[in-house]
Image: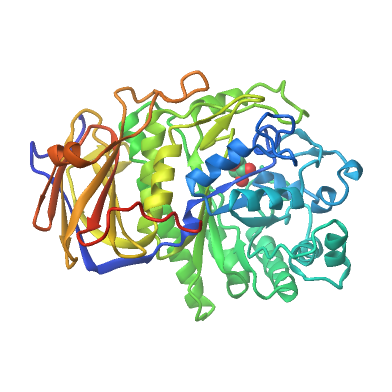
Amino acid sequence: MSGRERVRAETPARIVIDRDFTVGPIDDRIYGSLVEHMERVVYGGIYEPGHPCADARGFRTDVIGLVRELGVPIVRYPGGNFVSGYDWEDGVGPPSERPPRLDLAWIARESNEVGLNEFLYWAKEAGVECNLAVNLGLRRVDAARNLVEYCNFPRGSYWSDLRVAHGVVEPHGIKTWCLGNEMDGPWQIGAKSALDYGRLACEAARAMRRVDPGIELVACGSSTPRMRSFPDWDVTVLEQAYDEVDYLSLHTYFTNTGGDSRAYLARSLEMDRQIEAVVAACDLVRAKVRSRKRLSLSFDEWGIWSREERANRDSWSWRWKEANAVSEGMYSFEDALLAGSMLLSLIRHADRIKIACWAQLVNHLSLFSCAAGGPVWKQTVFYPFAHAARFGRGIALALSLSAPVYDAGELQGVPVLDAAAVLSKKEDEIVVFAVNRDLSRPLPVEIVRRGFAPFRAVEHILYESADLEAGNTREQPGRVVPSSRTGAELAATLDVEGDTVSLRLPAASWNVIRLRRSEARDVEPPRSGR
Ligand code: AHR
């Protein structure tokens, strides 16, 4: 480890948790994802008629199986940038009558073979809730309120009766709605100034909520903290729409452009900073508009843009085709470590973040991939996500963490240990998630519990790889997979003495340490929502 280093040789890093100090309940929806009409996410991803695993409606059941295994509770749809040029009416009614369109966001052809009702059929099969985005790029209030009427109004009005005529008798009952996408970005079709967007979001929210008062609405915050207008955009938008919306959105993607892995793994600290800045912006506006409501956040796009994916898009040969594999890539093991740290950041801010969506589910920036006519395989980032989605449900515990630190460029004092702790919903399990950012040395760690009944260690899930660049591919789908230590193997590597658990986290590793209340039976925790 080079650079400024305040490291003990063998002084353990320490995590202290106390039953009386909690961040708050974790909303399961922080383990959401995104399905956008782009590249092979929909066509050739979730939908591939003729594939041996396709169901009667053309959706791949092997993909659905992985979504269920991941434990994703909510999926944002249909974009992303795509939504800003999308006419939702094109995607309903008899498929043979649907117009093919040019998708200006991704310079692609959109057949409209998959539209709203098809996606919502898929969502039901996959056991996920839909977070539906409306087009506030090229369209305005009218299209948005009609869409709510089509989806959620029981019947007896033009748009709800049209839904019934399309064979969907029961309303879809979509609860969460995004008011556009990344409206501050010059790349966005119909991008707007903060003031114009704030007014439009406010008007759309009012009209949509008149149709269905039960819906929840997400206004677009800055599309990235790298925008010069961050966080002024957020403040101006909220000054217009604070009382009409329930959430403000955040987005961020990281890429290891410089090839410096230590600096790359530290970048989750930027995510912490971004969240804290947006919370401050929300609370500032709350004071300015004298609202009693405290706004929540929807981190509805987060993820990693791999180097490979960026490089492919430089070629323009892919233009105006459907289901192009333009920017598909393989995630490396170090991408999984950073993804793990980003998940920990979400958990640690569970008091304000109520929704988060990994972008995206399949084939593009994806948790898993699938080959046309072929198999599915899990990307490295699949594993920390699946562990967090499974074991990170319940109450986020506040933690006091002490660990050696290092400097990485602009990020100073980066702890080599990153961690979050969760008390399960039944309060019978404490799960500590931890990343050792030290690339060359194992890290001794003590986990100290205060104010809890006796707990014992039942499992240490360990994800490590000697090669940070290694990843999973169609040819080698099991190259980098986690392992699990239980029983005698666990006892040989982890010590429990009173309220302290001691173990060593291997260099560059993702760890899930499960402690179970002593009187609790040795059964797997239920998978929430299913
Ligand atoms: O996930 C891909 C794209 O990244 C989304 O369409 C957009 O919202 C973001 O810029």
Q: Total number of numbered labels?
A: 0
* Residue that lies at the very extreme toward the top in this rendered image: 475
Residue 524 in the image: state x and y as whole percent. Answer: 35, 51
Ligand 1 located in image quadrant = top right
Residue 128 falls left or right of residue 105: left
Taking 447 as reference, is 376 left or right? right
User: In the displayed structure, would residue 372 be above or below residue 242?
Assistant: above
Residue 443, by quadrant, is top left
Q: Residue at x 53, y 40 (%)?
A: 66
* Residue shown at 70% from the left, 73% from the top: 209
Task: Return the residue nearer the eye: 202 or 38.
Answer: 38
Q: Position of residue 61 (x, y in %)?
A: 62, 39
Residue 169, above or below 63: below
Question: Where is residue 463 drawn, in percent x and y?
Answer: 32, 34
Q: Judge by depth and name the residue closer to the eye, 384 or 203.
A: 384
- Residue at coordinates 23% horizontally, 67% vertically from top-left? 19
Q: Nearer the viewer, residue 316 or 148?
A: 148
